[in-house]
């Protein structure tokens, strides 16, 4: 067996080019060599392997059984060499990508992501969106697993380190697709109207249901879902109504009318920010921008 120290490794590059192209001429073009130079290299290869390696065929050069047997090993060896040469080159230092972890109530997901998604293309920012369980979300903010949370108003500990911004104080309405028949005008008509209930919990009650429960009343629930976007699709296809905060109804593109209740049912939307915003000026600027965009004009900020 020939000693590898006596072999010109460039011959293996020529072998791989002939095997890939099935042509001495095309192999020469790919390597920048003349056909005579390729033919000379093939003669040397035949001497090394003691085999013709390639024979002329109707459509070009066809490998012999020995040529087929060694082709893959030669290809892998060349790939390993190319990989070693690549890693030996000095690489430009890459800035670590900042990760922004975001969660919000599902009805505002499209608008929130629309606001955030253009940023990763322009900055070193990776956006991770996920939906934690509500009872765990504030804990995720506190321990750094989450950076931004858009959700209903929740009490905060003074020592949590979480910043809370007031975005919206709203009220529930009767939402419905455009072209809906006449919305219910009084409480009895409202209770009889089939509706879609939206709750993240399997049997959860909305603030409207809780308010009705205090009156000893119950509305007609025809469908229960966990997603506001799914509720919108069902409403548009079935003609059912649903009770939502007015801002959410507007975000979903639904028409709405007041609930026929003596007192409005409140909805408070807040933006919660993880503790690392205090030492991260870019995150603080992003938070302020999002808050200004989501908050109606004139509303104040608390934190």
Image (cartoon, rainbow, N blue to C red):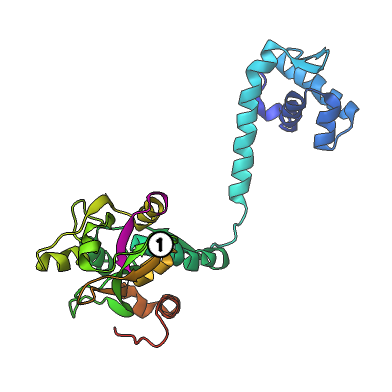
Image spot of residue 209 (x, y percent): 18, 63
Question: Measured from the top left, where is residue 166 in percent x and y?
Answer: 31, 80
Query: Is residue 301 highlighted in magenta?
Result: no
Q: Residue, x 28% and y 56% (percent of image)?
A: 195
The answer to whether residue 34 is left or right of residue 13 is: right
| Residue 24: quadrant of the picture | top right
* Residue 282 image position (x, y, % from top left): 45, 77
Q: Report the quarter where the N terminus lies.
A: top right
Q: Residue at x 66, y 22 (%)?
A: 71
Question: Is 75 situated left or right of 145 in this image?
Answer: right
Depth check, front residue: 237 or 122: 237
In the figure, residue 174 lies in which quadrant? bottom left
Q: Is residue 145 visible?
A: no
Q: Nearer the viewer, residue 214 or 292?
A: 214
Image: 71 above or below 57: below
Q: Disc 1 designates what residue?
A: 109
Residue 21 as seen in the image, left or right of residue 79: right
Q: Nearer the viewer, residue 144 or 207?
A: 207
The residue drawn where x is 60% and y is 50% is: 88
Residue 257 appearing in the image? yes
Element class at badge 1: helix
Q: Give the range drawn in magenta.
A: 236-245
Q: Quadrant of the C terminus?
A: bottom left
């Amino acid at each position: 067996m020939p000693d590898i120290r006596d072999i010109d490794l460039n011959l293996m590059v020529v072998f791989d080019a002939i095997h890939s192209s099935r042509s001495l001429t095309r192999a020469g073009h790919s390597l920048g060599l003349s056909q005579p130079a390729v033919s000379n290299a093939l003669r040397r290869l035949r001497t090394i392997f003691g085999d013709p390696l390639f024979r002329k065929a109707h459509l070009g050069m066809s490998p012999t059984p020995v040529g087929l047997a060694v082709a893959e090993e030669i290809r892998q060896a060349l790939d390993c060499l190319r990989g070693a040469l690549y890693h030996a080159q000095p690489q430009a230092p890459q800035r670590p990508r900042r990760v922004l972890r975001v969660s919000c109530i599902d009805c505002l997901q499209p608008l929130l992501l629309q606001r955030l998604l253009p940023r990763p293309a322009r900055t070193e920012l990776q956006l991770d969106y996920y939906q934690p369980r509500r009872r765990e979300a504030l804990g995720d903010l506190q321990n750094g697993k989450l950076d931004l949370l858009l959700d209903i108003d929740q009490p905060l500990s003074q020592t949590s380190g979480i910043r809370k911004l007031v975005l919206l104080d709203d009220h529930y309405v009767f939402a419905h697709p455009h072209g809906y028949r006449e919305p219910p005008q009084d409480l009895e008509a409202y209770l009889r109207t089939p509706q879609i209930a939206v709750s993240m919990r399997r049997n959860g009650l909305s603030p409207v249901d809780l308010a009705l429960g205090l009156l000893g009343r119950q509305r007609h629930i025809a469908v229960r879902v966990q997603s506001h976007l799914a509720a919108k699709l069902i409403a548009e296809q079935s003609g059912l109504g649903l009770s939502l905060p007015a801002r959410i109804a507007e975000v979903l593109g639904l028409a709405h009318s007041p609930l026929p209740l003596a007192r409005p049912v409140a909805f408070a939307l807040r933006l919660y920010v993880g503790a690392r915003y205090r030492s991260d000026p870019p995150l603080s600027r992003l938070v302020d921008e999002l808050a200004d965009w989501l908050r109606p004009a004139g509303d104040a900020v608390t934190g």
